[in-house]
């Protein structure tokens, strides 16, 4: 796209959202995310047939997505790995210099 931004439209439920993307890779990610959200909406609608209004479905999907993101964030903590690698490097250096 040569550094140009492109506005695409994705559909979430019955809402059309304009999204700005900078390259085809980002566009694919945005479209896949919209597809995932729509799938989650269908799942929630099937599971919970009676809610006070449509906004509850959107809120449930948003909350579930945030829970998944926060759970994944904890699993992606690489600090302990780098700490262990650093300790191993120190031990190797000590062994080499003996």
Image: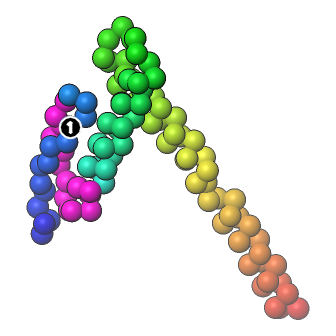
Residue 60 appears left or right of 74: left
Q: Is residue 52 magenta?
A: no
Circle 1 crowding by C-alpha within 10 Å: few under 14, some 14–19, many from 20: some
Coordinates of residue 49 in the picture (x, y in percent): 40, 16
Coordinates of residue 85 in the picture (x, y in percent): 71, 71
Choose top left, top right, bottom left or bottom right for residue 79. bottom right
- Single out the residue that lies furthest toward the top: 52
- Residue 18 appears in the figure: yes
Residue 74 appears left or right of 2: right
Q: Which residues are magenta?
A: 15-28
Q: Secondary structure at mark 1?
A: strand
Choose top left, top right, bottom left or bottom right for residue 16. top left
Q: Is residue 24 magenta?
A: yes
Residue with the mark numbered 1 = 11
Residue 75 appears left or right of 11: right
Coordinates of residue 57 in the picture (x, y in percent): 37, 22
Q: Quadrant of the N terminus?
A: bottom left
Q: Nearer the viewer, residue 23 or 37?
A: 37
Q: Nearer the viewer, residue 29 or 22?
A: 29
- The residue positioned 15% from the left and 43% from the top of the image is 9
- The residue positioned 29% from the left and 42% from the top of the image is 34
- The residue positioned 39% from the left and 34% from the top of the image is 40
- Vertical relation: 51 (above or below) 85: above
- The residue positioned 39% from the left and 11% from the top of the image is 51
Coordinates of residue 54 in the picture (x, y in percent): 30, 17
């Amino acid at each position: 796209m040569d550094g140009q931004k492109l506005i695409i439209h994705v559909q979430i439920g019955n809402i059309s959202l304009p999204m700005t993307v900078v390259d085809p890779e980002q566009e694919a990610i945005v479209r896949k995310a919209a597809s995932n959200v729509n799938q989650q909406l269908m799942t929630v609608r099937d599971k919970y047939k009676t809610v006070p209004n449509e906004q509850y479905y959107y809120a449930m999907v948003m909350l579930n997505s945030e829970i998944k993101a926060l759970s994944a964030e904890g699993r992606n903590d690489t600090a302990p790995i780098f700490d262990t690698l650093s300790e191993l490097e120190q031990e190797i250096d000590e062994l080499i210099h003996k």
